[in-house]
Amino acid sequence: MRKIVPWLLLVSASLWAGKTAPRFSLKDLNGNTVTLDSLLTKGPVILDFWATWCTYCDEELDLLNEFQKEFGDHLTVVGISIDSPKTIAKIRAMKESHDWQFPILLDPSKKWKNRYKVFALPTVFVISPEGEIVKTHFGYNPSQEENLRQEIRALVQEYLAQQESPDTTQP
């Protein structure tokens, strides 16, 4: 992977900060259609754009699998593979060998990769239950794992607090 210029990361990350996530509809490995809207009904969503040929993608997906296990029903992690249709068997094998506990969606045309303006793999989008992109992480850096964990923990805690407090604006 090419070295990424730090200012480019800041500009790209700021493109999405506070923006509404593009609403996708993609097939999973079993041919079922999954939409972002259906995922958001369960709480915060983590999208990870990746590919089988990406050197660090499986490491990041392993980390996100830990988050899925840690936060359980209060977080939905989704891997979006941009591999060609020929690699479905390889994608399936990676999912099984790593025991990833989250769905893998397929974007072989790269339509959604382009709509999300993904220029480096892996790329993670942290999305609030309201569909707002809260954070974007380009590339994988093990030294940033704890920061990402804290961001996700804060978002899940905020979501749970909203679920527990009654809405006082309704009559």
Image (cartoon, rainbow, N blue to C red):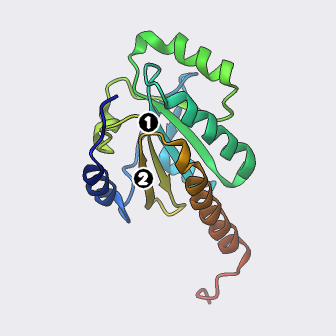
SS label for mark 2: strand
- Which percent across, then down, holds residue 120? 34, 37
Residue type beneath disc 1: Pro
Asked whether the viewer can see residue 38, the reply is no
Give the residue drawn at x 25%, y 50%: 8
| Residue corresponding to mark 2 | 136
- Give the residue type at disc 2: Thr
Helix or strand or loop: what does disc 1 sit on?
loop
Residue nearest the viewer, comparing 37 with 131: 131
| Residue plotted at (62% across, 23% down) | 95
113 relative position to 155: left or right? left
Residue at the image position 59 percent from the left and 43 percent from the top: 77
Residue placed at 66% from the left, 38% from the top? 65
Residue 38: x, y in percent? Answer: 55, 48
Which residue was labeled with disc 1?
A: 122
- Please say if 91 is above or below 143: above
* Occupied quadrant, residue 115: top left
Which one is in front, 28 or 157?
157
Query: Against 26, is 93 above or below?
Result: above
